[in-house]
Amino acid sequence: MKVLVFAGSTRIASYNRKLAREVAGMARLKGAEVTHLELGDYDVPMYNADLEAKGTPADVMKLKQVFYEHPAWIICTPEYNASYPALVKNTLDWLSSPVKGDPVWSDDFRFSRGKVVGVLSASPGALGGLRSQSHLIPLLLNLHCWVAPQTYALGRAGSAFDDQGHLLEEAAKQRAQSVVEQVLWAAERLHAR
Ligand SMILES: Cc1cc2nc3c(=O)[nH]c(=O)nc-3n(C[C@H](O)[C@H](O)[C@H](O)COP(=O)(O)O)c2cc1C
């Protein structure tokens, strides 16, 4: 099973990136073929239909293909103002915007339809970014994704990792692991050949 894991943050010391690395490792241990994507490696401008009319940016086209090739995604999102960050929205908006006249990518939900998606969040606050999930999940459903019912919000993220970036608490590891397992379980069934 090919699983795409990414954090909705480009911050060097991002808690969500650390969490993404942890769940990527867990998925690998379960036999998944994991791609840990860094959104910061892609040059994606703020969405603008006038810019798009001149041609969809090359890195957006690359990302469409990467997302399309993975039947399962795991997203670790920060919470900004009780929602998910513009980085996540902007990326998904670009990816869902049809490429007019393109024989393959004129289908807006080609990159996302039928994907099994696990949602996690991490925040220094007590709620762990839980409210970001309640906004992100409807967006994913709109993209025709199947969202795993099990989610995890890691609170007090500033003290949740050791110096190597590993989760300290066994309970946190188990909660993250349960999301990974549910995503793999569902993806193997929905994408069985
Ligand atoms: C504009 C802005 C709004 C924020 N709003 C929230 C919030 O509503 N809830 C919360 O728990 N943290 C909030 N934070 C704090 C983030 O959770 C914190 O910066 C976190 O480290 C971001 O995730 P990262 O470590 O993966 O980059 C906010 C941060 C910023 C910059």
Image (spheres, helix red, strand yellow):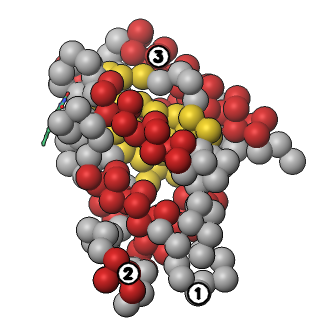
In the figure, 175 relative to 144: above or below? Answer: above
Ligand 1 within 8 Å of disc 1? The answer is no
Q: Position of residue 124 (x, y in %)?
A: 18, 25
| Residue appearing at x 37%, y 36% in the figure | 135
Which of the pair 32/144 is nearer the observer?
Answer: 144
Q: Secondary structure at mark 3?
A: helix
Q: Position of residue 123 (x, y in %)?
A: 23, 28
As drawn, is 134 to the left or to the right of 69?
Answer: left
Which residue position is annotated with label 1?
101
Amino acid tagged 1: Gly
Q: Residue furthest top?
A: 171
Q: Are marks 3 and 1 in contact (CB under 8 Å)?
A: no
Residue 103, by quadrant, is bottom right
| Residue appearing at x 59%, y 60% in the figure | 109
In the figure, 52 relative to 72: above or below? Answer: below
Q: Are marks 1 and 2 in contact (CB under 8 Å)?
A: no
Residue 22, by quadrant, is top left
Q: Position of residue 32 (x, y in %)?
A: 65, 40
Amino acid tagged 3: Arg
Q: First in sequence: mark 3 or mark 1?
A: 1
Total marks placed: 3
- 10 Å neighbourhood of mark 3: few (<14), some, or many (≥20)? some
Indicate which disc residue 52 carries.
2
Indicate which disc residue 175 carries.
3
State the CA–CA distance, disc 1 to disc 2. 13 Å
